[in-house]
Image (cartoon, helix red, strand yellow):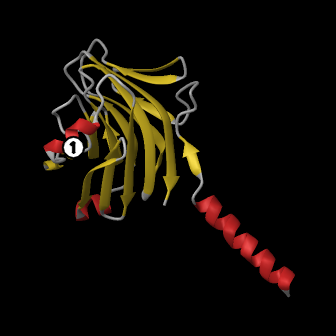
Amino acid sequence: MKKIILLALMLVVAQASFAQKKVKLFNGKDLSGWKIYGTEKWYVQDGLLVSESGPDKGYGYLGTEENYQDFEIELEFKQEANGNSGVFIRSTVDGTKVSGWQVEVAPPGNDTGGIYESYGRGWLIKPDPSKDKALKFGEWNKMRIVVKGDNVTSYVNGVEMVNFSDAKIGQGKGGVLLQIHDGGGIKVYWRNIVLKKL
């Protein structure tokens, strides 16, 4: 009887571990598992994912081939030049028109960690300006985004930027996207992109 109980407990632990398994979305070698939208540049250099404005100076996106509903994603980014970018959640793309929600990645004073709805309501929530000091421009920054039901919480370097609930986000379906903003002169490096389904 003890063996049966022990075996049952081991199965429960194994299932829980599997459900919480972290997945590396970027392998450090190529863009496997991702799709490019637009003409802006996405490439791998020295084990880093690089996003850079192209000749069209338009919007560009790199999206996961798989959709993710409830999840926690951690990644690191480093900005050069303008550095205006973002991480989209539950989002889809048609050409370079995106439907979904962006957790902002931008130069100082431009609301990194806030949530913006593209081609919709615009800014849904911006971080308190005092939290902007969490961003280290030109250095590596760690971003964590937790998406569960209708709630999104974003963190930059361990500082909670926003905690926001919204019915429309709760109904959203789609993948994770990285963005290059339009206007040209943008370069952002990414690494250690890890996702855990919740």
The residue lying toward the viewer, choosing from 67 and 163, is: 163
Amino acid under disc 1? Lys
Q: Is residue 87 above or below residue 15?
A: above
Q: Residue at x 30, y 18 (%)?
A: 53
Image quarter where the N terminus lies is bottom right
Residue that protrudes farthest toward the bottom in the picture:
1
- Tell me if residue 91 can be seen: no
Quadrant assignment, res 157: top left
Circle 1 packing at 10 Å, graded few (<14), some (14-19), many (20+), is some
Quadrant assignment, res 3: bottom right
> x, y (%) of residue 159?
31, 47
> x, y (%) of residue 181?
24, 28
Q: Residue at x 45, y 55 (%)?
A: 71
Quadrant assignment, res 183: top left
Q: Residue at x 57, y 46 (%)?
A: 23
Query: Which residue lies under the disc numbered 1?
Result: 131
Viewed as shown, does residue 165 lie left or right of 63? left
The residue lying toward the viewer, choosing from 55 and 23, is: 23
